[in-house]
Protein backbone atom coordinates (compact mmCIF):
# COMPACT_ATOMS: atom_id res chain seq x y z
CA UNK A 1 0.00 0.00 0.00
CA UNK A 2 1.49 3.39 -0.96
CA UNK A 3 1.54 6.54 1.12
CA UNK A 4 -1.41 8.90 0.47
CA UNK A 5 0.83 11.98 0.80
CA UNK A 6 3.43 13.26 -1.63
CA UNK A 7 5.84 14.01 1.21
CA UNK A 8 6.31 11.97 4.34
CA UNK A 9 6.61 13.74 7.65
CA UNK A 10 7.81 11.88 10.70
CA UNK A 11 7.01 13.21 14.14
CA UNK A 12 9.41 11.50 16.54
CA UNK A 13 8.69 11.67 20.24
CA UNK A 14 11.27 13.59 22.24
CA UNK A 15 11.61 14.57 25.86
CA UNK A 16 12.45 18.19 24.97
CA UNK A 17 9.15 20.05 25.43
CA UNK A 18 9.97 22.81 22.92
CA UNK A 19 10.84 20.32 20.21
CA UNK A 20 7.82 18.15 21.05
CA UNK A 21 5.52 21.18 20.85
CA UNK A 22 6.93 22.10 17.43
CA UNK A 23 6.51 18.52 16.22
CA UNK A 24 2.91 18.40 17.39
CA UNK A 25 2.32 21.80 15.81
CA UNK A 26 3.28 20.24 12.46
CA UNK A 27 0.50 17.68 12.93
CA UNK A 28 -2.17 20.20 13.94
CA UNK A 29 -1.12 22.65 11.21
CA UNK A 30 -1.35 19.87 8.62
CA UNK A 31 -4.87 19.00 9.79
CA UNK A 32 -5.93 22.65 9.63
CA UNK A 33 -4.35 23.00 6.17
CA UNK A 34 -6.37 20.04 4.89
CA UNK A 35 -9.61 21.52 6.22
CA UNK A 36 -8.89 24.94 4.67
CA UNK A 37 -7.82 23.45 1.34
CA UNK A 38 -10.84 21.17 0.96
CA UNK A 39 -13.34 23.43 2.72
CA UNK A 40 -14.58 20.53 4.81
CA UNK A 41 -13.38 18.50 7.72
CA UNK A 42 -13.38 15.12 6.00
CA UNK A 43 -10.77 12.99 7.74
CA UNK A 44 -7.67 12.33 5.65
CA UNK A 45 -6.32 8.85 5.24
CA UNK A 46 -4.20 7.91 8.24
CA UNK A 47 -1.53 5.28 7.88
CA UNK A 48 0.22 3.27 10.57
CA UNK A 49 3.70 2.30 9.39
CA UNK A 50 6.14 -0.24 10.82
CA UNK A 51 9.44 1.63 11.07
CA UNK A 52 11.51 -1.48 10.34
CA UNK A 53 9.63 -3.10 7.46
CA UNK A 54 7.67 -0.09 6.15
CA UNK A 55 4.52 -2.23 6.21
CA UNK A 56 1.44 -0.02 6.38
CA UNK A 57 -2.16 -0.31 7.33
CA UNK A 58 -4.78 2.36 6.86
CA UNK A 59 -6.55 3.41 10.03
CA UNK A 60 -10.35 3.81 9.90
CA UNK A 61 -11.53 7.43 9.48
CA UNK A 62 -12.92 7.39 13.04
CA UNK A 63 -9.32 7.45 14.35
CA UNK A 64 -8.52 10.85 12.81
CA UNK A 65 -10.56 13.08 15.18
CA UNK A 66 -9.17 11.19 18.18
CA UNK A 67 -5.59 11.52 16.95
CA UNK A 68 -6.08 15.20 16.14
CA UNK A 69 -7.56 15.98 19.57
CA UNK A 70 -4.72 14.09 21.25
CA UNK A 71 -2.11 16.00 19.22
CA UNK A 72 -3.75 19.36 20.01
CA UNK A 73 -3.96 18.56 23.74
CA UNK A 74 -0.35 17.38 23.86
CA UNK A 75 0.80 20.50 21.98
CA UNK A 76 -0.84 22.60 24.71
CA UNK A 77 1.03 20.57 27.33
CA UNK A 78 -2.06 18.67 28.43
CA UNK A 79 -2.34 14.95 28.98
CA UNK A 80 -4.38 13.07 26.40
CA UNK A 81 -6.35 10.11 27.69
CA UNK A 82 -8.62 7.84 25.68
CA UNK A 83 -11.41 6.35 27.76
CA UNK A 84 -14.02 3.95 26.39
CA UNK A 85 -17.48 5.49 26.81
CA UNK A 86 -18.89 2.53 28.74
CA UNK A 87 -16.16 2.76 31.38
CA UNK A 88 -17.15 3.24 35.00
CA UNK A 89 -14.86 5.45 37.06
CA UNK A 90 -14.25 5.81 40.79
CA UNK A 91 -15.12 8.95 42.71
CA UNK A 92 -11.42 9.89 42.74
CA UNK A 93 -11.11 9.43 38.96
CA UNK A 94 -14.27 11.51 38.48
CA UNK A 95 -12.82 14.21 40.74
CA UNK A 96 -9.58 14.24 38.76
CA UNK A 97 -11.51 14.50 35.48
CA UNK A 98 -13.61 17.44 36.71
CA UNK A 99 -10.74 19.09 38.59
CA UNK A 100 -12.49 19.00 41.97
CA UNK A 101 -11.95 17.13 45.23
CA UNK A 102 -13.30 13.64 45.85
CA UNK A 103 -15.52 15.00 48.64
CA UNK A 104 -17.09 17.43 46.15
CA UNK A 105 -17.92 14.50 43.87
CA UNK A 106 -19.48 12.64 46.80
CA UNK A 107 -21.69 15.68 47.58
CA UNK A 108 -22.70 15.93 43.89
CA UNK A 109 -23.68 12.25 43.98
CA UNK A 110 -25.58 12.63 47.26
CA UNK A 111 -27.57 15.57 45.83
CA UNK A 112 -28.55 13.34 42.89
CA UNK A 113 -26.91 15.59 40.29
CA UNK A 114 -24.93 12.69 38.84
CA UNK A 115 -26.11 9.07 38.63
CA UNK A 116 -23.94 6.30 40.07
CA UNK A 117 -24.05 2.69 41.15
CA UNK A 118 -22.83 1.44 44.48
CA UNK A 119 -20.85 -1.79 44.58
CA UNK A 120 -20.55 -2.77 48.23
CA UNK A 121 -19.25 0.49 49.74
CA UNK A 122 -17.74 1.84 46.50
CA UNK A 123 -19.46 4.27 44.14
CA UNK A 124 -18.95 3.93 40.39
CA UNK A 125 -19.91 6.56 37.82
CA UNK A 126 -20.39 5.87 34.13
CA UNK A 127 -17.97 7.99 32.15
CA UNK A 128 -20.73 9.03 29.72
CA UNK A 129 -22.75 10.40 32.65
CA UNK A 130 -19.69 12.24 33.93
CA UNK A 131 -19.07 13.75 30.50
CA UNK A 132 -22.73 14.83 30.23
CA UNK A 133 -22.54 16.43 33.67
CA UNK A 134 -19.33 18.31 32.78
CA UNK A 135 -20.79 19.60 29.51
CA UNK A 136 -24.00 20.69 31.24
CA UNK A 137 -22.01 22.57 33.92
CA UNK A 138 -19.82 24.23 31.27
CA UNK A 139 -22.89 25.30 29.30
CA UNK A 140 -24.37 26.88 32.43
CA UNK A 141 -21.08 28.69 33.06
CA UNK A 142 -20.98 30.03 29.49
CA UNK A 143 -24.59 31.21 29.79
CA UNK A 144 -23.79 32.90 33.09
CA UNK A 145 -20.77 34.57 31.48
CA UNK A 146 -22.99 35.96 28.74
CA UNK A 147 -25.37 37.40 31.37
CA UNK A 148 -22.74 39.12 33.55
CA UNK A 149 -23.51 42.83 33.75
CA UNK A 150 -20.77 45.31 32.97
CA UNK A 151 -19.45 47.23 36.01
CA UNK A 152 -21.95 45.49 38.29
CA UNK A 153 -25.03 46.90 36.53
CA UNK A 154 -26.60 46.83 33.10
CA UNK A 155 -26.23 50.00 31.11
CA UNK A 156 -28.03 50.87 27.92
CA UNK A 157 -25.10 52.73 26.38
CA UNK A 158 -23.89 51.44 22.99
CA UNK A 159 -20.59 50.42 24.60
CA UNK A 160 -22.38 48.19 27.11
CA UNK A 161 -24.42 46.55 24.33
CA UNK A 162 -21.25 46.02 22.35
CA UNK A 163 -19.50 44.30 25.27
CA UNK A 164 -22.61 42.28 26.13
CA UNK A 165 -22.65 40.94 22.55
CA UNK A 166 -18.96 40.12 22.75
CA UNK A 167 -19.53 38.13 25.96
CA UNK A 168 -22.42 36.24 24.35
CA UNK A 169 -20.32 35.51 21.26
CA UNK A 170 -17.43 34.23 23.37
CA UNK A 171 -19.79 32.11 25.47
CA UNK A 172 -21.45 30.67 22.35
CA UNK A 173 -18.06 29.96 20.77
CA UNK A 174 -16.81 28.15 23.87
CA UNK A 175 -20.01 26.16 24.09
CA UNK A 176 -19.74 25.12 20.43
CA UNK A 177 -16.04 24.23 20.48
CA UNK A 178 -16.14 22.22 23.68
CA UNK A 179 -18.81 19.74 22.62
CA UNK A 180 -17.59 16.14 22.72
CA UNK A 181 -17.13 14.33 19.44
CA UNK A 182 -19.01 11.12 18.80
CA UNK A 183 -16.72 8.21 18.34
Image: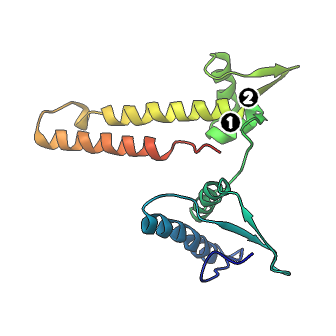
Image quarter for residue 17? bottom right
Query: x%, y% of residue 142?
Result: 41, 37
In the image, taking residue 26 as reference, residue 156 lies left or right, namely: left
Between disc 2 and disc 1, whose residue precedes? Answer: 1
Decide which of 3, 90 is in the foreground and name it: 3
Indicate the quadrant containing the N terminus: top left, top right, bottom left or bottom right: bottom right
Secondary structure under the numbered disc 2 in the rendered image: strand
Name the residue rendered at 59%, 31% in the picture. 132
Query: x%, y% of residue 14?
Result: 71, 76
Name the residue rendered at 75%, 35% in the picture. 86
Please identify the residue farthest to the top as the structure is shown: 111
- The label on residue 95 is 1
Q: Which residue is mark 2?
A: 125
Please identify the residue farthest to the right as the structure is shown: 120
Image position of 115 with respect to 42: above or below: above
What is the C-alpha distance between the residues marked 2 and 1? 11 Å
Decide which of 79, 152 is in the foreground and name it: 79
Amino acid sequence: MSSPFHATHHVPVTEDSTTREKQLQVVTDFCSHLEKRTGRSTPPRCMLTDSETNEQIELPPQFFPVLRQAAEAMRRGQIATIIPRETEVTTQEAADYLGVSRSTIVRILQRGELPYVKINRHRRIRFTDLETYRNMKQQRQFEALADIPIDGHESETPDADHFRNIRKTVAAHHGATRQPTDS
